[in-house]
Amino acid sequence: MAEKKGQNFLQGAAIYTVGIILVKILGAVYKIPLGNILGDDGFNHFDVTYKIYNFFLTIATAGLPVAMSRLISEADSLDRDRQVYRVFQVGTMTFLVLGAIGTGIMMLFPAEIGAYMGDVQTARSIFIMAPSVLLVCVTAAYRGYAQGHADMIPTTVSQVIETAVKVAVGLGCAGYLYKAGYSVEICVAGAILGTTVSSLAAMVYMIVKVHRKYQVKPSPEAKDNPPSHGRVLSNLLRIGIPITFSTSIMSVIQLLDAAITLNRLQSAAGFTDEATFVLNGVYAKAMTVYNVPSAFVVPFLSSIVPAVAAARMKQGPEEAANIAESSLRMCTLVCLPMAVGMAVLAEPCMRVLYPGAAGQGALLLFELGITCYFMTMSLMTNSILPAHGNERLPLISILLGGTAKVIVTYVLVGKPGINVYGAPLGTLSCYVVMLGANLFFMARHMARPMNIGRIIGRSGLSALVMGIGAWAVWSLLHGLMGGVTATVAGRELNILLPFLAAVGAGVVIYCVLAIALRAITLEDMKLFPKGEKLAAKLHIR
C-alpha cells in the first residue's frame, strides 16, 4: 500500500505556488543573461526552438498528468492499491509512447521543422532538444502519481531542480562556447543542451523520490480487482483529452504566431533573414520581461478557484460572484501597476536588462506593457468560469482570441512600416478579445455582471499617478546624469541609477495611494491565508 503522506488542498496549493514563483524567478535569471550572451539573432533561434519544444510537450503532457492524478486519487481513497498500480502502469506507457513520438519527430525532421518556422538555423538546436520531450513525459507520469496521493512536494522540488540545472548548464555551455569563439548557432545549441540535461535530472529525482517514498507495487495482501488495461486507458483519455485540447490551443496559436511573424517579416515586409532574426530576437527578449507578472497570478488562481466553487455550492451564486469580483480586484491591484511600470519605463528597462539589444525593444516592451494587464485578467477569468461550472466557455474565448491574434499579426507584421511592432499588437488583440468574451460569459452565467468600476477604479487611479511619478523621476535623473559615462557590469550609470530610482519611487507612490484610497478591502484580504492579520497591520478595513 502506498504511504499515506500528503498535504491537504491548501497546503498543496501553497507549496506549488511557492515553487512556481521560484521557477519563474530562476527562469528570468536564466533568460536575461542568456539573451545578452546570444545576442538578438541568437536569442531568436533559442526562442523558436523553445516554442517548438513547448508545442510537442503540451500535446504530450497537458492533460494526462491531471487525469492520472485524479484516477489514482480516487482509487487510493478507496484503498484499491492494485488499481492505483494499474493506472500508474498504463499512464506511464502512454507517456512513453507520446514522448517517443514527439522526440522522434524532432530528431528525424529538425531541418524541415525549422524551415516551416522560417528559421533553418534552429535545426541543430531542435535535434538536441528532442530527447527532452521523452524525458519530461516520464517525469510527468511520476508527478501524476505523487499528485494523486495529494503530495505536491516532489513535483515542486523537481521543477526547481529542473530550472536550476538548466540555468547552470545552459548558461555555462553558452558562455563557454561564446568565449571560445564558436558561431551563434553552436552557442544556442549549447544553451539548449542545458534543457535536455535538466530534464534528465528532474526525471531521475522523480523516479528515485517516488520509489523511496511509496510502495509503488501493491502488496500481496491487496485483494481489489482492478479494471482492464484498456478500460484504464479509456478513462485516462476521456479525462485527459479535453484538458489537452483546451490547453494546447494557445500553444498551437503561439507556434503559428511565431511562424507567421518570421515568414511575414521575410516575405511581405522585405527584411533579410539576418534582419528578421534580430527583430524577432529582440521581441523575444521583451517577451521575457512581459511574462514575469504572470508568476504573481498563480497565488490568485490557486486560492480563488476553490473559493468560488465552494461559495457557489454553500452560499449561493451571489456570493460566488462577489468572490469572483474580489479576485479580479486583487489581480488588478497587483498586476496593473506592473503593466503601467513596464510601459512607462520600457526604454530604461530594456537598456538595463539587455544593453546590447536592438533599439526596437523599447517600443515593443511598451506595447507588451499595455498588453500585460489584459493577459493576467484573461488568466483569472479563464479560471473563474470553470470554478463556476462553465468549463467549456473559456475554450470559446481562447479560440476567439487566438483567431484575432493570428489575423492581426499576419496583416500588421506584413506591412513594412509596422513590421515586428505588429506582433505585440496581435497579442494585445488576443487578450482584449479573450477578456471581453469571458466578461460577457460571466455576465450571462453568473448571478450578476462584474462591476468594472469597482475592479479597476481605485487601483487604476493609483497606477496612473504611480506611472506619472515614475516617469518623472526617470526623466529628471536621467537628464541630470546625462554627462555621466561610467558603467557597471556593462550598464551605463546614467541609465541604471535613474531606472532603479524610478522603480523605487513608483513602488512607494503606488503602495501609499492604494492603501490611502482603499483600493483593497478587508473582504478581499480574507480570500488568502492569514489575509486578516496582514490587513490589520496595513490598517485595511
Image (tube, rainbow, N blue to C red):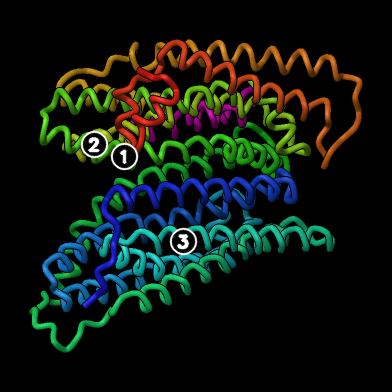
Q: Quadrant of residue 499?
A: top right
Q: Which residue is mark 2?
A: 307
User: In front here: 465 or 130?
Assistant: 465
Q: Residue at x 73, y 34 (%)?
A: 352
Type of amino acid under label 1: Ser
Residue 249 is marked as: none
Magenta residues: mostly which secondary structure?
Answer: helix
Q: Which residue is mark 3?
A: 157
Q: Quadrant of residue 184?
A: bottom right
Q: CA distance from mark 2 to mark 1?
A: 6 Å
Whether residue 408 appears in magenta in the rendering, the answer is yes
Q: Residue at x 41, y 68 (%)?
A: 139
Q: Quadrant of residue 446?
A: top left
Tally the numbered discs: 3
For the record, the magenta segment spans 400-429
Q: Which residue is mark 1?
A: 303
The answer to whether residue 157 is above or below residue 379 is below
Q: CA distance from mark 2 to mark 3?
A: 26 Å
x then y, percent, for residue 29: 63, 48
x then y, percent, for residue 34: 69, 50
Cβ–Cβ under 8 Å for marks 2 and 1: yes
Secondary structure found at label 2: helix
Type of amino acid under label 2: Ala
User: In front here: 237 or 461?
Assistant: 461
* Residue at the extreme bottom of the image, as rendered: 220
Q: CA distance from mark 1 to mark 3?
A: 21 Å
Q: Is residue 107 left or right of residue 244?
A: right
